[in-house]
Image (spheres, rainbow, N blue to C red):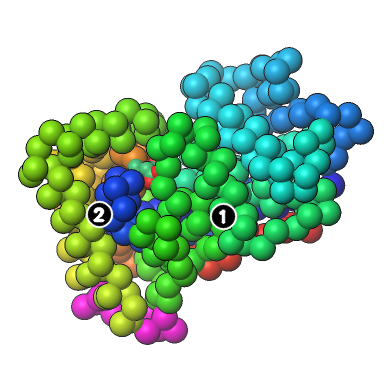
Amino acid sequence: MTISSAPGKVYLFGEHAVVYGEPAVPCAIERRATVTVERRSDDHIRVEARDLSLDGFTVEYTGDTEYRPDVDVPTALVDAAMGYVDAAVEQARDAADMPDAGFDIIVESDIPLGAGLGSSAAVVVAGIDAATRELNTPLDCREVARRAYNAEYDVQDGQASRADTFCSAMGGVVYVEGDECRRMTAPNLPFVIGFDGGAGDTGELVAGVRRLRSEYDFAAKTVGSIGEIVRQGETLLQNANPETTPGQALLTELGQFMDFDHGLLEALGVSSRTLDNMVWAAREAGAYGAKLTGAGGGGCIVALDETSETETALEYTAECHDVFRAELDRIGVRVEE
Ligand code: PMV
């Protein structure tokens, strides 16, 4: 039996624009998906998923034979999660050149599903790592990231960037631009996350931006401007001392860039009233900046604030279902004892 875990992430900057070759800076957070894999003697796959949301619910899903949600959860989300597990298994079988390997798999996660925190990437990364180890073919982190990207690419019909999977496999703050993926040095950032309890439809949201971008020059320029924010944000982070707590000047400027990024994402039609209300609650509480994270449409926002003001304000915001602080997680995929 092998257990691996991998972190979720927030986008400091660059979601959506990254789909068109612009850069993005995702940051791994201390919320993990854990995948337990045990080799079977036959070629079947049995998957059990537990606690796949912040609220915690249990579903049991057994490959193509059984599907039993215990409580009322969005079936589409659970199905989607299972699709990612299947794709991870395919990658592991391929890496080990054992196309008939069967597994019992348990997926546990404290990353809300489809909410912009990279839940699917974390499941795929941890799943590939655990399954390849179980087949005595351990991969290095970069190879896990590469295969996890392939898996997401398959499941999402080609609508995937390398950002989520690379960040989850490597941990820390990463820079992704096209095929270029690298870790960055960066100080600890005081992330506060607000969750509206919902989820956006990534495929639909990506398609909407694609349409706008191809139809209107100003929309294409908006996507390009997001890329500019990312480049300048990267310079700010690279020049900061990773060993010390970030100073107010750095946080103020990063926050301003986040606010700007959110405005452009809003213009591209991927925000929502609940996300906007949470963003404004954070700003009014004195956060350095706030923006949606991930595909948008619903799900999570990320704010920068080292005080407890933003958390308190979000707790009293009607649209906010849950709020939590998330430390930067410098460790990517890892084996659990
Ligand atoms: O919502 P998430 O965490 O799956 O992020 C989606 C980010 C996009 O840039 C919209 C799509 C992608 O694959 O990069």
> In the image, residue 206 lies at what x, y percent?
31, 35
Residue 283 visible, this orientation:
no
> In the image, residue 30 lies at what x, y percent?
53, 58
Name the residue: 31% across, 59% down. 23
**Residue 145 marker:** 1
Residue 219 is drawn in which quadrant?
A: top left
First to last magenta residue range: 241-252
**Residue 178 marker:** none
Q: Nearer the viewer, mark 2 or mark 1?
A: 1
- Where is 232 relative to 304, above or below? below
The residues tagged by marks 2 and 1 sit, at their Cα atoms, a distance apart of 28 Å
Name the residue: 29% across, 48% down. 20
Name the residue: 65% across, 25% down. 59
- Amino acid type shown at disc 1: Ala
> In the image, residue 278 lies at what x, y percent?
25, 43
The residue identified by callout 2 is 290
- Amino acid type shown at disc 2: Ala
Which quadrant of the figure contains the C terminus? Answer: bottom right
Residue 192 is drawn in which quadrant?
A: bottom left
Judging depth in this view, the residue of 15 and 21 nearest the camera is: 21
Crowding at mark 2 (Cα within 10 Å: few <14, some 14-19, many 20+) = many
